[in-house]
Structures are given as C-alpha cells and as structure tokens.
Amino acid sequence: MTHFLAQAADRLFLEGYGYRYGLNFKTIDVAKGKRMMVEAMEKGSLIAKARCHFHGWGGLPRDMKEAF
C-alpha cells in the first residue's frame, strides 16, 4: 500500500471517530462513525483495524490482544 492511501484511510478513520464521539464540531452520529471506521479498516488503516478488534466490528473478532 502506498503512503498516500494509508494517509487517506487514517483521515477517514479520524473523521469517523469525530462523528462517533462528537469531536471537531461534528454532530454525534454513532452509526455513521462506525461505518466510516470500518471502511477505513478495509482501506488499510492500522488504527482503524485496532479499533475494530476492540469493538468486534467489520467481521473481526473482539480481541483485546490484537487491539493493543
């Protein structure tokens, strides 16, 4: 994966995180935030993958060892 694609996936994760928790002046939208974070994981974001393991989203098992 190129550096640019990883950056784009991480930006998508951060935007989704903002929606889920109401950060950066975003209105809280839990479902939209989750969808964006799962999509970021699918596009290669490692932080999104860890978050998905933490919650058991995106078809990943809930696994604290993988999350941290």
Image: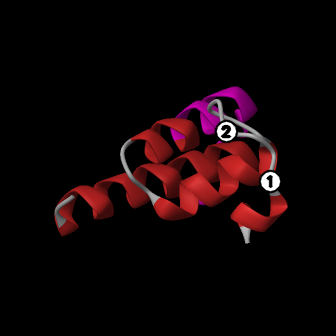
Task: State the residue at coordinates (55%, 63%).
Answer: 47
How would you rate the neighbour count of disc 2 (Cα within 10 Å): few for under 14, some for 14-19, many for 20 or more? some
Query: What coloring was used for the rendering?
Result: secondary structure
Look at the image and tell me whether residue 26 can be seen.
Answer: no
The residue that disc 1 covers is 63
Q: Position of residue 43 (x, y in %)?
A: 36, 44
Residue type, numbered disc 2: Leu
Quarter assignment of residue 16: top right
Count of all numbered marks drawn on residues in the image:
2
Residue 63 coordinates in the image, percent (x, y): 80, 53
Residue 60 image label: 2
Q: Amino acid at mark 1?
A: Asp
Secondary structure at numbered mark 2:
loop
Question: Which residue is rendered at x = 59% and y = 60% of the image?
Answer: 24
Q: Is residue 1 above or below residue 31?
A: below
Task: Tell me what residue is drawn at x 70 percent, y 36 percent.
Answer: 57
Residue 39 in sight from this viewpoint = yes
Question: Would you say residue 33 sits in the magenta stretch?
Answer: yes
At horizontal 40% and vertical 58% (from top left) the residue drawn is 11
The residue carrying pointer 1 sits among few (fewer than 14), some (14 to 19) or many (20 or more) residues within 10 Å by Cα, namely some
* Quadrant (top left, top right, bottom left, bottom right) of the C terminus: bottom right
Q: Against 14, is 52 above or below? A: above
Task: Say which mark, if any, is on residue 29.
Answer: none
Q: Are marks 2 and 1 in contact (CB under 8 Å)?
A: yes
Report helix, strand or loop for mark 1.
Answer: loop
Spatial CA span between label 2 and label 1: 8 Å
For the N terminus, give its image quadrant: bottom left
Q: What span is colored magenta in the figure? A: 24-36
Q: Quadrant of residue 51?
A: bottom right
Q: Is 44 drawn above or below residue 47 in the view shown?
A: above
Closest to the observer, 33 or 4: 4
